[in-house]
Image (cartoon, rainbow, N blue to C red):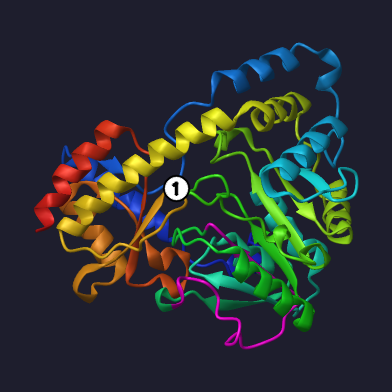
Amino acid sequence: MNIEPADRVKQLPPYLFAEIDAMKREVKKRGIDVLDFGVGDPDLPTPDFIVKALQEAFQQQNYHRYPSYSGSNEFRCIIAEWFKNRFSVSLDPEKEIIVLIGSKEGIAHTPLALVNPRDKVLYTSPGYPVYKIATQFAGGTPVPVPLKIENHFLPDLDKIPTTAKLFFLNYPNNPTSANAPLSYFEKLVSWAQKTDTILCHDAAYSEIYFGEEPTHSLLEAPNAKSVTLEFHSLSKTFNMTGWRIGFAVGNAKLISALGKMKTNIDSGQFIPIQRAAGAALQKGETFIQAQRTLFKSRREQLVETLRQTGIEVYPSDATFYVWAKTPKGQQAMTFCATLLNELGIVTTPGIGFGAEGEGYFRFSLTVPDAQLAEARRRLKKLK
């Protein structure tokens, strides 16, 4: 029997990180202690008060049944309260909020809910690969929008080449760590209304910022709710990557379409996890502030060392990533291979996030302080 995967699977690009994993194994065989700055997965545990909330909810047998596809009323009301306090934006818990099994799930399902075959979908490059892949799976036509350092890694709205059904973007940005001011979001919403484009904003890193001014939700811009679907995640904020809990907010019709897709192909998140996530949003501000202090300190230490070696670093005040230029025009994959083979340091080549990422590489700050100190010692050998 000749078994072949579907064409949509065949069209997936080669998995760049499989090559990196193979190189890691070879380096480890040489007895080198590998320091992994590649994956953005927080190294510290989920806070105790969140774990305790899960444990208490887990004892309730009625929570072990099928949950609501759109999320519990209790959690959606907590989200609405948090959003109002954090961004001064009012949301209808029933119509403008949906709970997700991680924001990635919602992002991946959105093209299936909104995009028809051959519809054009804009996405930022470099950017989260799911934007492009989910579009392809839905039969849409992905169109990259380049992010350039001279434009502070913000899309140049005057140079977007085509109109489209929707536009995937995210700020604070992965991988560049760039942030978007509210004034830019206001221009973006105006552009979307003029071009009849749905904005799908991935705000997974909204709570990881280091400046005095908090980051902004796209929904803070006037009239944004008419064109916006915004995704939030508890993964990075509360060290809950494995818990798979997030939510989408925004235009009621867009939320409804996403909900209809979820109803047919997946399920709701386990209620005890929603209860724990609710505790995180209600009681987590002190923890969040401590996280910001930690990541800011790590960032300052790493950036200082990189600049001492002559590496140019993008001056960011958000996310737990450091985005830097490769030296002397070296290609991203080549330089990252050098860091791994010669120094035992794993980084992510920018090309893995799209063509516009060539010439850059990314550090994730989600490593213990001792490993960061050792990496700084090794990086000084680049001089």
Q: Is residue 138 above or below residue 21?
A: below
Name which residue lies at 59% across and 49% down. 204
Q: Is residue 278 above or below residue 257?
A: above
Which element carries disc 1, helix, strand or loop?
Answer: loop
Q: Is residue 278 above or below residue 301?
A: above
Do we see residue 33 in this rendering? no
From the viewer's perspective, tell me whether residue 239 is left or right of residue 274.
left
Q: Which residues are magenta?
A: 151-172
Rendering coords of residue 144 (x, y %): 57, 77
In the image, what residue type sits under mark 1? Phe
Rendering coords of residue 164 (x, y %): 72, 80
Rendering coords of residue 41 (x, y %): 46, 40
Name which residue lies at 73% across and 77% down. 190
Main structural element of the magenta stretch: helix, strand or loop?
A: loop
Q: Quadrant of residue 118?
A: bottom right
The residue labelled by disc 1 is: 210
Q: Is residue 216 above or below residue 135?
A: above
User: Residue lying furthest front in this view?
Assistant: 212
From the viewer's perspective, tell me whether residue 332 is left or right of residue 380.
right
From the viewer's perspective, tell me whether residue 326 is left or right of residue 323.
left
